[in-house]
Image (cartoon, grey):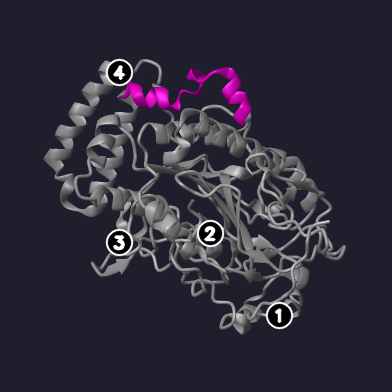
């Protein structure tokens, strides 16, 4: 049995939260508790010397995003002492962190926790997939907390876009020159865009414009997720029959002449289109890019260790992209479209336990552990930040369909590498996994931690479509560094 902790929250009572039960949070219920459960204004420990010394230690970042809302109770925050309508049917197993347990279906993660900092007290108040994902992907409160809205250039930029912009503007930075030389993008997403009643917000450059849109690339190989995964944005780096590199190079030269004659640099939109067009041609011509995306250049044993599925092959590709100089790569560890909660994704409203143990947890567990082992063996873990995110957790109470519903009131994430203190468990939820019990934090604090590790001030200024200055992040770095 795991040790239980006394309930001592000064926020919402457990009864208040649990009364929402399997139905999750309705919009009206959400409005009732917003004043008590604001996620971004939380108490934290002051920055430590370790946090200060870790500034800028990471050269790159890999984000693994569990699209659909990963159940914290069934993965990283097990509650074996809870009642039968709350606790997971999965057994807890010991990890390499003394006293910390995870789900039995995370055997590989269990052997990696000495390299990880697990954060079990993240929360916000956006109960829809797109609003929750937006908050976690951008670090900013969504304009629509409980529903969908059309993605636009007024949205905040994605984490990758902001990191790309900040890194490009640092004094003495040669990032843009290197990216141009190597035909790479400053931010990449794999393997699909996220969809739920339309393309999810917060995945692109937002008000930074098309020139900061991450490139979306699907690996050439790997068993796809079950379910609908839109292929929009997929770039195929294979040359079509009859088009060799010499002919492609001549076409690029001609295209450049046409672009000049038409003055395609006259508008921001045209600049973005021209940039992407040139970049696509550069990628097709670049031998280095070809090697980066050619997973057959990796030993078979390495590929198999990550898993011969699109999750594993995407994470392996992400590792290769950061090695090639891409500052931030995001892997969406799920089918791209939530498609009615029936595909291979973390939106487990029904038949949840079977879907988690058969479809979702094993690839995530396998690829995560392989990534940490590879980065450690190569010496790159000290300079690569790895982050595990999701849009929210799942309700403590199991619903009649054998699943759990949307639950932003508390969820778990994790960090590793680049000076992160291994074996650390930060914050905790109450006995039933219903609310933070200690050290609550929000998405803005997660972003501040990432920015800090990458050497980016959380006061970095961005400019929206009207030219107004906006602070990139309003959170504070979590004290997770050794």
User: Mark 1–mark 4 contact, CB under 8 Å?
Assistant: no
> For the point 62% across and 81% down, which residue is it?
33
Q: Which mark sits nearer the N-terminus, 4 or 2? A: 2
- The location of residue 10, given as percent across then percent down, is 64, 81
Q: Quadrant of residue 435?
A: bottom right
Magenta part, dominant SS: helix
Q: Is residue 203 visible?
A: yes
347 lies left or right of 290? right
Residue at mark 1 = 13
Disc 2 crowd rating (10 Å Cα; few below 14, some 14-19, many 20+) is many
298 lies left or right of 430? left
Residue at mark 4 = 245
User: Mark 4–mark 3 contact, CB under 8 Å?
Assistant: no
6 lies left or right of 139? right
In the rendered structure, which segment of residues is drawn in magenta? 286-306
Disc 1 crowd rating (10 Å Cα; few below 14, some 14-19, many 20+) is few
Q: Is residue 190 found inside the magenta-colored segment of the image?
A: no
For marks 1 and 2, give the CA distance.
Answer: 26 Å
- The location of residue 373, given as percent across then percent down, is 57, 32
Q: Which mark sits nearer the N-terminus, 4 or 3? A: 4
Element marked by disc 2: helix
User: Mark 4–mark 2 contact, CB under 8 Å?
Assistant: no
- The location of residue 117, given as percent across then percent down, is 57, 51
Label for residue 460?
Answer: 3
Residue at mark 2 = 133
* 226 vs 254, nearest the viewer: 226
């Amino acid at each position: 049995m795991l040790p239980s902790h006394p309930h001592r929250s000064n926020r919402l009572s457990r009864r208040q939260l649990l009364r929402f039960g399997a139905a999750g949070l309705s919009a009206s219920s959400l409005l009732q508790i917003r004043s008590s459960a604001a996620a971004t204004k939380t108490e934290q420990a002051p920055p430590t010397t370790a946090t200060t010394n870790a500034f800028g230690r990471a050269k790159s970042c890999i984000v693994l995003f569990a699209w659909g809302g990963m159940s914290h109770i069934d993965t990283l925050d097990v509650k074996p002492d809870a009642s039968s309508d709350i606790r997971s049917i999965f057994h807890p197993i010991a990890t390499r962190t003394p006293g910390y347990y995870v789900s039995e279906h995370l055997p590989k993660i269990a052997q990696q926790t000495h390299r990880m900092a697990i954060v079990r007290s993240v929360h916000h108040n956006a109960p829809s997939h797109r609003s929750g994902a937006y908050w976690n992907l951008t670090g900013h409160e969504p304009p629509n907390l409980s529903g969908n809205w059309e993605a636009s250039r007024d949205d905040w930029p994605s984490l990758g876009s902001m990191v790309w912009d900040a890194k490009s503007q640092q004094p003495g930075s040669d990032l843009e020159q290197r990216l141009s030389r190597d035909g790479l993008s400053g931010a990449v997403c794999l393997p699909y865009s996220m969809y739920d009643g339309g393309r999810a917000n917060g995945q692109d450059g937002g008000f930074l414009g098309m020139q900061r849109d991450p490139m979306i690339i699907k690996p050439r190989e790997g068993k796809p997720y079950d379910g609908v995964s839109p292929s929009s944005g997929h770039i195929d780096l294979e040359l079509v029959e009859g088009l060799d590199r010499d002919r492609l190079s001549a076409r690029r030269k001609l295209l450049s002449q046409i672009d000049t004659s038409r003055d395609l640099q006259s508008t921001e939109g045209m600049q973005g289109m021209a940039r992407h067009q040139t970049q696509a041609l550069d990628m097709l011509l670049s031998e280095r890019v070809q090697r980066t995306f050619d997973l057959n250049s990796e030993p078979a044993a390495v590929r198999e260790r990550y898993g011969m599925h699109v999750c594993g092959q995407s994470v392996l590709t992400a590792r290769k992209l950061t090695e090639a100089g891409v500052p931030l790569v995001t892997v969406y560890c799920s089918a791209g479209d939530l498609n009615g909660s029936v595909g291979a994704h973390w939106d487990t409203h029904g038949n949840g336990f079977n879907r988690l143990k058969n479809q979702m947890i094993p690839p995530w567990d396998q690829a995560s552990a392989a990534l940490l082992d590879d980065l450690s063996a190569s010496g790159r873990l000290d300079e690569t930040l790895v982050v595990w995110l999701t849009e929210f957790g799942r309700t403590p109470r199991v619903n009649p369909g054998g699943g759990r519903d949307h639950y932003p009131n508390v969820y778990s994430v994790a960090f590793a590498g680049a000076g992160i203190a291994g074996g650390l468990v930060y914050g905790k939820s109450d006995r039933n996994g219903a609310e933070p019990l200690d050290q609550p934090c929000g998405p803005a604090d997660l972003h501040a931690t990432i920015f800090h590790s990458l050497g980016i001030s959380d006061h970095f200024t961005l400019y929206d479509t009207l030219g107004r200055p906006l602070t990139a992040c309003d959170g504070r770095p979590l004290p997770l560094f050794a």
